[in-house]
Amino acid sequence: MSKTKSKAKGATLFKKILVANRGEIACRVMSTAKRMGIKTVAVYSEADRGAVHVDMADEAVCIGPAPSAESYLVQKNILKAIADTGADAVHPGYGFLSENASFARALARAGIAFIGPKPHAITAMGDKIESKKLAAKAGVNTIPGHTEAVKDARQAVSIAKKIGYPVMIKASAGGGGKGMRVAWDDAGCKEGFERATSEARSSFGDDRVFIEKFIEEPRHIEIQVLGDSHGNVVYLWERECSIQRRHQKVIEEAPSPFLDDETRRAMGEQAVSLAKAVKYQSAGTVEFIVDKNKNFYFLEMNTRLQVEHPVTELITGLDLVEQMIRVAAGEKLAFGQSDIKRDGWAMESRIYAEDPFRNFLPSIGRLVRYVPPGADLADDGAVIRVDTGVEKGGEISMYYDPMIAKLVTWGRDREHAVETMQSALDAFYIRGVSHNIAFVAALMAHKRFRAGNLTTNFIAEEYPDGFNPADVPSDNAEVMIAAAAAVHMAYQLRAAEIGGQTKGYERIVDHDWVVITGDDEHAAEVRPVDGGYDVRLAGGLVPIRTRWQVGEAIMPVSVNGQRLCLQVERIGIGYRLTHGGAQRDIYVMNPTNAALARHMPVKAAPDTSKLLMSPMPGLLVSVAVTEGQEVKAGEELAVIEAMKMENVMRAERDGVVSSIKAAPGDSLMVDQVIMEFS
């Protein structure tokens, strides 16, 4: 089922669109182009030779080596691909060259349509310092701050003191959480300036930063706008994007559970005013920060399609990519502000290749198993949508963004959308790389999230010590124990059916088992019945009703009318069950073996306290110490860059550096030793 209307009807506005991007967003653009009868061209780096977007396109052109600076960001290579394939339009997606005015101008000189805003709008809004001045002139509320580029750390501290801590240090050309630091005092301001400028330089080639007041208890709410070349601009309601980690959005929803209609309208009208001030054409987003009293202030305008655009599509029924294509072809918007209705509630979760139990360190590798939830999982009119650019066997590379997919749900109201998201997360089966599904599932179940009490500090406040397994809800722990017992019984029954067993020594399946979860043991009586298994635990009967077959990864079950979805896999002699983000390694044994297992020794973990090891694959940017140097707890040791984010490694305790095993510029593997201590 789709919640996005189509008005294409075979129209061919362009003959061929080259998508100057990769991954999920390239696939997203191509799906709409194909529906509109427009041919597509993919560009790809050598690392993406076998990528999904390459197979999806009608034509594909290699544009360089794996690093984006040598491929996706090289304008001349893309311009050559356009010339070689005869494309008459380019969609830039998001990131890369999507907000690059020089690229848009180069396309215009070549007579190629840019499916995005005009260069003057990109330039005006792409510089955060200048955009704030324009916003103020257009009557848009702005945050107090210093809008000129900051020269050095000393000036940064001086400015911060005048504004008053806390302050936000932000890259002028920034985005995606890169080149952003919050400073609460002078020391933090100095370090934040250094880190922000360094990240800005490496990510955007522009190290200018500015400083503004950091709004406490803030919400991040943005307005989607759409303009055409005939002077028409509308807003397509708002998106709440307050659930962020390190300024990177994790969950987005539309509408916002916080806004009233009056504030919603005022924000929309200011967003339209700003868009009209720069004669905006195409889809764009005006981002605001909103305080607890519903005062709102302009943050920035993103002159491109946003990652989170699907939630807007699901509540409005509009295909934003289609609208961008039509506007770029010179069409007028086919609707006015009063025509834009809001239907239901939409929720988006970003599924990243990262390990939430290891401080969200990036994870790279091959997707050994990749089974997204199907649309048939949705019930009661709900919608499940998966936007992705990967497939089973694909590679998550260290060179690009770690996003695996965007999981989007729609429901008649917020509760319905959240419940559908929980079911979809349970059915999203990924193996081969670490991922953040457990974390997102925990957020969905969090009482504060369910109440809509959100701020951009939500994650930092609710998980001050990071995320760990104890933070995952375990409301259905009894069901997982019973399901493990049922799974074990299914394996035993299958083994009993194997032919050729020696007469008199056939496998006899008992009904009494011991289920071991960590240090706990649970006596279980398991009996097969029509449609599943009856499992009797100490707390009573747990009727597991399921169509699950041995070897299947997804186990849908019904327990007393409650429908659940579990993931099941064998791990040696045990089973790993996952539900609601909770992962349990469970062993099911007969009573005799369970008694013997209590006497098995536990293998001690190796002592790594005197080693600094790389927690992720990445590039060693710098080493701040030398051999023989004494270091104090908290002192900077090294900086590692992974997926365009710099990670500072600090000493956990006082010590002396006895040897350094890696040098700046080295590519590190996970757990590779960087230095040793004595």
Image (cartoon, grey):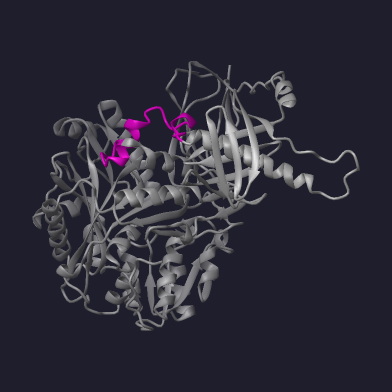
User: Does the image show residue 615?
Assistant: no
- Which residue is pictured at 45% across the width and 81% down the height? 86
Q: Is residue 385 left or right of residue 486?
A: left
Q: Taking 570 as reference, is 99 above or below it?
A: below
Residue 470 included in the magenta stretch of the image? yes
Q: Quadrant of the C terminus?
A: top right
Looking at the rendering, the stretch of residues picked out in magenta corresponds to 448-475
Residue shown at 30% from the left, 56% from the top: 412
| Residue at the extreme front of the image, as rendered | 530
**Vertical position of residue 659 compared to residue 244: above or below:** above
Q: Could you tell me how many numbered marks the image carries?
A: 0
Residue 391 lies in quadrant? bottom right
**Residue 184 position in % (x across, y down):** 25, 29
**119 and 18: which one is in front?**
18
Q: As displayed, is residue 66 above or below residue 442?
A: below
Q: Is residue 335 magenta?
A: no
The answer to whether residue 120 of the structure is visible from this angle is yes
Q: Position of residue 159 (x, y in %)?
A: 18, 35
Q: Nearer the viewer, residue 302 or 315?
A: 315
Quarter of the image where one finds residue 223: bottom left
Locate the N terminus by quadrant. Answer: bottom left
Q: Is residue 599 left or right of residue 235?
A: right
Q: Position of residue 670 (x, y in %)?
A: 58, 38
Q: Is residue 36 above or below residue 279?
A: below
Q: Residue 101 at what x, y percent from top left?
A: 30, 64
Relative to 640, 308 lies left or right = left
Decide whether the magenta segment is chiefly helix, strand or loop: loop
Left or right of 553 on screen, residue 375? left
